[in-house]
Amino acid sequence: MSKLLESYAAGRWHRADDEGEPLLDAVTGQEVARLSARGLDLGAMAAYARTVGGPAVRELTFHERAGLLKELALHLTAGKEELYALSLHTGATPRDSALDIDGGCGTLFSYASKGRRELPNDTIVLDGPTEPLGVGGTFVGRHVYASRPGVAVQINAFNFPVWGMLEKLGPAFLAGLPTIVKPAGQTAYLAEALVRRIIESGILPEGSLQLLCGRPQGLLDVLTVQDSVAFTGSAHTAGLLRGHPQILHAGVTLNVEADSLNCSILGPDITAADPEFDLYVEAVITEMTVKAGQKCTAIRRIIVPSDLADAVIEALIERLCGITIGNPANEDVRMGSLVSLAQREEVRKAVESLRASADIVYGDPHSVTVVDADPERGAFISPLLLRAARGAAEPHDVEPFGPVATVLAYDSVEEAIDLAARGMGSLVGSLITHDPEIARRIVLGLAPWHGRILVLDRDDAKESTGHGLPLPMLVHGGPGRAGGGEELGGIRAVLRHMQRTAIQSSPDAMTTITDCWTTGAHRRTEALHPFRKSLTDLAIGNTITSPPRTITLDDITHFAEFTGDTFYAHTDPEAAAANPLFGGIVAHGYLVVSLAAGLFVDPDPGPVLANYGVDNLRFLTPVKPGDSIAVTLTVKQITPRANTDYGEVRWDAVVTNATGTPVATYDVLTLVAKTWPRT
């Protein structure tokens, strides 16, 4: 008997007390492993996540969590060959496995990078500016994101056992949540191997990752109001989850990524001689054959102009004839098998439903020639291309989760949009056109029905990542039939796991709560210039107020000549006087900012290493010749950087005129040594 997969629960590996159900090699039909979770205490898993894993993760800052994700991605990448070998049992070719395994590691790398660059070295995230709530400035409001004291449960599909796990784990971990993974049974042996590598590495805090290998009955019963479920799979199962009492009444949140009848539209501007025609054919072939069409983002509906339908079908058939099917371990094989014999039967049933209004123009659902394999013992099926009749309903209702796509013809842009929309919500759609105006019309028509839209032409083809590849920086999800959920999308995915709360308080309280200086809060003015303080010695609220400096007409004239900015408001008294905003010569805004820097900068070598930018610059009041300006500079936010001897300091800068009226406001960004003198 083959290996019985184990679950990782409450700090130990759990082996079921029965023999489990067999999991078969998709290519040979031989038993690979057995699956059972009998005897597993799901309540203990959830409690362990909340009491051990959650506190350990939330104790870390976003930057520290990001550092662990990077370390984990490096560790998994170094040992990926073991995962590649196991992936062959799923029917995946090496190219298919790269999407799953390297794609998963790449997603971790992306979130590690974004966590360091786009999140603070803190445990909360500030959302938007401070809002004044009173006339006197003593009552303010601000939104913050805070970590929830719950657990993130992921229930994954069979087709991407590695990527599907890691793309959910990365954002949840950054958000401060422990994760319980429930992989699909058919490919659970690959998920178990991945989790073993993670647990054995000791990189993630104990309790931050647990694994349930087996049937999940009762899992949702142990979840509570702070917990969440991320589900990838069929619309039928999603419907069952949506009806669960803990989802309906106990506040458990559910995110669904489900069935999707994705389409690709060939623009009406394209001819068979255009490069876009070949790009279109290549995209369809790729989406039909990669992972044997077992991708939630694969093209199911091929929407083409009526006068090109025959040419498109002919080109697709020519390419499909060159696709070698068989054992994915053979280097000559382009397409492997489906994940199981049961899945092959599901695809055959779907194709039979499609045939009610479409004809098969390539392939046979019951016959296929394969290399180095038995076509009956393995879950092999031929790529299948269908052509739908006008008005066909089935291609918009039935998803064959395999290497199957249907050609539908259109006569106008409006009809193409209508055909796409009949899918009732999709994860992704693509449009191949070289006409920007057509692109705008169709994209705006498709957008309400799609989570992502690729516009492909000869200009972006070389760098395009393709129709079917979700990217960590872009949202993955879709409305309607696609589940209505959303994953990835960069830091959006992290914030979706957190609670956004509006805080109302005094400026001083807000400064302490957010660890970010708030306008109206007390400032700390000391004899020592803040630029003489290291990161360790600086404190939120440290302030310098400069003496005034008068701006003369000579200053304005010199700046105009020196920089070449001779805009009339700075150089032509008559034209400037006619300007209703100025009524005469005014100083350049950038002259004001430059002179302000001269007022607050301490020139000698010290802990301030560099100024690396200015944020939120606004010019509020014109400065005329003879006006004086002064600047108040306050330490707003301090962010130490990991593994370096310096950190970031954000300064609040307010430039005022002689009456105290602000003329410019902005944030100055500097890099400051953690200690000084530097050791």
Image: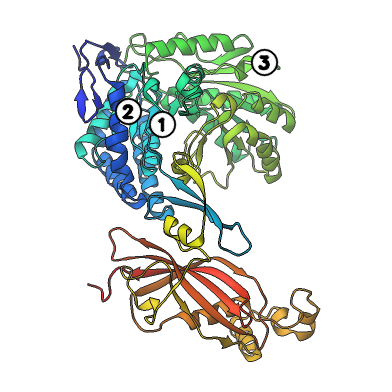
Residue at 47% x, 57% y: name it.
Answer: 510
**Tag shown at residue 250:** none
Residue at the disc numbered 2: 46
Left/right of residue 674 with respect to residue 467 in the rendered view: left
Percent coordinates x, y for residue 635 in the rendering: 43, 69
Left/right of residue 110 with respect to residue 453 in the rendered view: left
| Residue 634 showing in the rendered view | yes
**Dot placed on the residue nearer the N-terminal end, 1 or 3:** 1
Residue at the disc numbered 3: 392
Comparing 384 with 239, the one in front is 239
Between the C-alphas of marks 1 and 2, the distance is 9 Å
Q: Secondary structure at mark 3?
A: loop
**Tag shown at residue 227:** 1
Between the C-alphas of marks 1 and 3, the distance is 42 Å
Query: What type is the residue that disc 1 sits on?
Result: Asp
Q: Quadrant of residue 664?
A: bottom right
Q: Which quarter of the rendered picture does the N terminus lie within?
A: top left
Q: Secondary structure at mark 1?
A: loop
- Figure colour scheme: rainbow
- Which of the two marks, 2 or 3, is nearer to us in this view? 2
Between the C-alphas of marks 2 and 3, the distance is 47 Å
Query: What type is the residue that disc 3 sits on?
Result: Ala
Query: What type is the residue that disc 2 sits on?
Result: Ala
Q: Contact, CB < 8 Å: mark 1 with mark 2?
A: yes
Bin the neighbour count of mark 3 within 10 Å (Cα to Cα): few under 14, some 14-19, many 20 and up.
some
